[in-house]
Image (tube, rainbow, N blue to C red):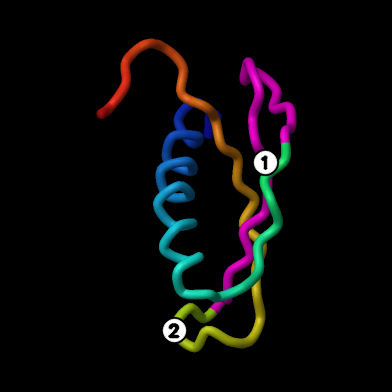
Amino acid sequence: MRLSVFLPVLLSTTLTAIPVASLTGQLPQRPLEPCTINDVPGEVLCGTFTVFEDREARAGRTIDLHVIVLRATGESRVT
């Protein structure tokens, strides 16, 4: 799958999931750090978001979700 198709889906699910999960106090998270992604110009932030495999139990084994955050570009702003 091409990055241009996959990336918006990944970002939209990641950006909406992180604030909700952080409110539940699940697990400590690692901070985002600057990184470089091939074919993506400019600064990108990368990190890992750890979640429980069984979200309802909020216990047990965990998995790491690798995330990237791209800063918005252009003049169009949502207010």
Residue 74 location, x and y as percent?
Answer: 41, 12
Write the residue at 52% across / 27% down.
Answer: 71
User: What SS does tag 2 mark?
Assistant: loop
Badge nearest the viewer, 1 or 2:
1
Write the residue at 63% across / 65% down.
Answer: 50
Tell me, yes or no, whether the highlighted magenta stretch contains residue 51: yes
Q: Residues within 10 Å of mark 1 (few under 14, many from 20)?
A: some
Amino acid, disc 1: Cys
Whether pointer 1 and pointer 2 mark residues with C-beta atoms closer than 8 Å, the reply is no
Of the residues under marks 1 and 2, which one precedes in the sequence? Answer: 1
Residue bearing mark 1: 46
Write the residue at 74% across / 32% down.
Answer: 35
Residue 55 location, x and y as percent?
Answer: 48, 78
Tell me, yes or no, whether the highlighted magenta stretch contains residue 56: no
Would you say 48 lies left or right of 9 here? right
Depicted 44 relative to depicted 29: above or below: above
Residue 48 location, x and y as percent?
Answer: 67, 54
* The label number, if any, that marks residue 24 in the structure image: none
Residue 14 location, x and y as percent?
Answer: 48, 49
Mark 1–mark 2 distance (CA, rounded to whole Å): 27 Å
Write the residue at 65% across / 62% down.
Answer: 29
User: What SS does tag 1 mark?
Assistant: strand
> Among all residues in the image, which is located at the extreme top?
75
Would you say 51 lies left or right of 10 here? right
Depth check: 51 or 39 in front? 51
Quadrant including the C terminus: top left
Depicted 55 relative to depicted 21: above or below: below
* The label number, if any, that marks residue 56 in the structure image: 2
Q: What segment carries the magenta color? A: 34-53
Amino acid, disc 2: Glu
